Image (tube, grey):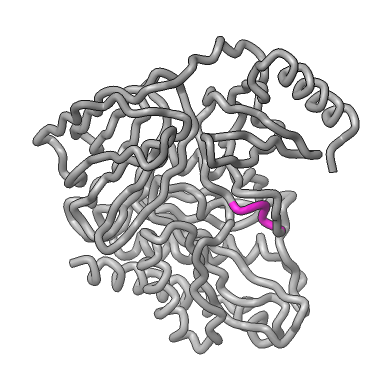
Amino acid sequence: MKTPILACFFLLMFQANAQTNAPRYKLARSGGKLPALLYGLGADRLGGAKMGYIDTNIILRVVDSTKDMYNVQLSKFHSAYIEKIYLKFDSIPAEKPFYLTNSFSVKGDTAADVVAISMEEKLPYKSWMEINPSKIMVDIYGVQSNTNWITQLKSLKEVKNVYYNQVEDDVVRVTIELVHKQHWGYSIGYNGKFLTIRVKRQPQKLDLRFMKIGIDAGHGGTNAGTGGIRSKYEEKYYTLLFAKALQKLLKSKGIRNVVMTRTADTTFDNKDRILFMQHENPDLLISFHLNSSGNPQVSGVSTYYKHIGFRPLTQSILNRMLETKLNEFGNVGNFNFVLNQPTDFVNTLLEVAFMSNEDDERKVMRSSFHDEVATKVYLGMLDWLKGLK
């Protein structure tokens, strides 16, 4: 339901615009920590379904308002929602009648392959992964193409082809074909007025000893997570034990480049964990959690992913985890967990077991089980890499 003040504001604005033939929207720019576009107003305990994170200072057309969200018009036939805290209405320049894409530059640097699209303004976009064959897809909204050349250099190592189509009058779709079957991640945002996609390369050696592994112990500090039936400890306590067990095992296997989001019972905001991991740029991230249900009979292990290109790792880890004799709760895709949202690196959420189930909880409480889970995760990672070879 619209709040009275904002509803009146937009009603008056629309009435005034109708009389003056002015546009029926108000311009704003994105800001804040990891702003995201949402498909609609539906929500669950993890929030609404996200199109994805967008950069700051992107210009958006606000056409309506709800209690917590603005409705933004991305193009003629596409709209989205964004939380109000992520928009600012000050210092917006006069809008042009139309915006254009210009030349593309596609080349490799010392760390990644880079697709840079020259733009007249920081406009909204959506990106996603496709498989078989592997591609990165980008829709740019509110723009017409004036791209008459795409320059691709021999320094590319992961990008195979780049091309675009004007799929709607004001939507340009960019296709980035990849060399390898496995998606290793990409970052997307503006560098000046260039929409830039940095495509991560496959490691030269598919060997964990030469890779950086990120480990996240879910919850912590003031965010306790779920509780158990018999255990006096909460989820945050056990996720740290699982994370440390994996860290110890990896180091014993000669894997020295391991980065942890936390090593003690500390509070660490989930968005800050994303920013931290984006800075660390691991090759893969494992996030440990424990599940809970109102039905005490529900039990088992599950793995989760958001982006289809990252699914293979989650499958390999789940297959190994089932060797612990836990029941299978499933491999869950398009999951809305915040640490599954980044496209920057391969990631998986592992819900080890259900704290609300007595049999599962008894396992979680045993130190030998922590080591067993670490071993299964490690073997799952090895299986995944073997499959890529």
Quadrant assignment, res 188: top left
Q: x%, y% of residue 348?
A: 46, 61
315, 115: nearer the viewer: 115
Q: Is residue 17 left or right of residue 179?
A: right
Residues rendered magenta in the picture:
45-49
> In the picture shown, does residue 45 fall above or below 74?
below
**Quarter that holds the N terminus:** top right
- Position in image of residue 52 (x %, y %): 52, 45
The answer to whether 200 appears left or right of 215 in the picture is: left
In this figure, what is the number of numbered marks?
0
Residue placed farthest to the left in the image? 154
Question: Quick one: 43 or 369, which is closer to the camera?
Answer: 43
- Quick check: 276 above or below 300? above
Q: Residue at x 66, y 25 (%)?
A: 25
Q: Residue at x 42, y 34 (%)?
A: 169
Residue closest to the far right: 4
Q: Main secondary structure of the magenta part?
A: loop
Q: Nearer the viewer, residue 127 or 174?
A: 174
Name the residue: 57% across, 70% down.
351
Q: Quadrant of residue 37?
A: top right
Q: Is residue 386 above or below residue 10?
A: below
320 drawn magenta = no
Inspect the magenta stretch and tell me whether residue 47 lies in it: yes
